[in-house]
Amino acid sequence: LRHSAQLALASMSSSQPLEEALRIRFTKQLLAFRDDDSLEEWSFPPTLASNERKWVHHLAKELGLESKSSGKGSERFIKVTRRKDQDKGARRFELLRELPLSTNVRVLMDNYFSSFPVQPEEMEALYAAAAAKALARSVGESKTLDADSGNQLLEPPPQPRRSRRRNRWAATNPQVLDSRMMSYSLAQQRREENAQFDAQMQARARLPAWEYRQVVADLVASNQVVMVSGGTGCGKSTQVPQFLLDDPRIGPSCNMVVTQPRRISAIGVAERVAEERLESIGNIIGYAVRMDVATTEATQVTFMTP
């Protein structure tokens, strides 16, 4: 009985979610170690709980590092090292892919980041996003890993990705495209006939982004890449997708994905945009976050987490 109780407590400890502050701290430490050629190894103290050790093992694997638990009982700690077959000179860029950008685009981006350098709070957001991504992968992996050694314990059968295949088919099938364009036209007509339409348009017109609606639509219609910059609350996430939806050149056949840093913000912004368009969530406007999807074949704007 005592042994069973210990196993139950260990299982409860390993299944508890890790606090975001810890995920960010561990991510910072391992990223700093990976990018510092002068360090040969990085150790985590034996004070870590089993769920924290499990997460560190998974994060190290995601970053292309090797991790190993050593010691026994209360003296057990994690040592992280670089892969022996890893080229130090290429390590920092092994997970990056070069974007095929033209010279003009590169010059524009250099000028932009020179004028608006990355701020410390933005770096914190990037660390948080990296930590959240690693956590999502660790939870959603088909392979369950041992908290201490990272050895494979169980591999469930793969699940079919029906929604992904359906969306790819829908994006190329002429009949589905015709159906979606018809749904778009009917939705636009219902909006304009709704008694609350004028009030919603007046509320949207008070946002700073409103005066740039035609400029944004023209740029997107004539360019492959458009960078939009604006202050917090100006309407980038809520209004720019609607500008494109309402443009007759873009709206009838467009598909948009809007990323949000958190699950609650993705759902909240999607619901707000659907409300502004006087429709229920899951029609033209939808969202897709882990374990919760509200989209149909008629959905053209999907708010989601990275």
Image: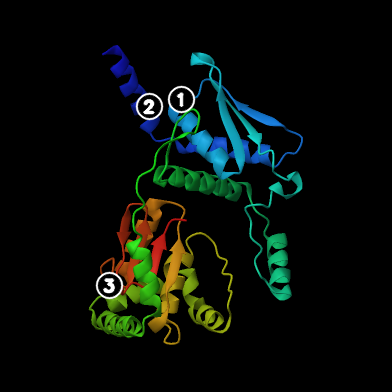
* Viewer-nearest of discs 3 and 1: 1
Residue 13's disc is 2
Q: Amino acid at mark 2?
A: Ser
| x and y percentages locating residue 208 in the rendered image | 49, 70
Q: Hey, what amino acid is under mark 3?
A: Leu
- Image: 83 above or below 301: above
What residue is drawn where x is 27% and y is 83%?
A: 186
Q: Give neighbour class at mark 2: few <14, some 14-19, many 20+ (Cα, 10 Å).
A: some
Residue 124: which quarter of the image? top right
Contact between marks 1 and 2 (CB within 8 A): the answer is yes
Image quadrant where residue 193 sits: bottom left
Residue 299 screen position, x and y as percent: 33, 72
Lower position in the chain sequence, tag 3 or tag 1 = 1
Q: Report the disc number at residue 49.
A: 1
- Pinpoint residue 225: horizontal percent, then vertical percent: 59, 74
Residue in front for this viewpoint, 10 or 25: 10
- The earlier-in-sequence mark between 3 and 2 is 2
Residue wearing tag 3? 278
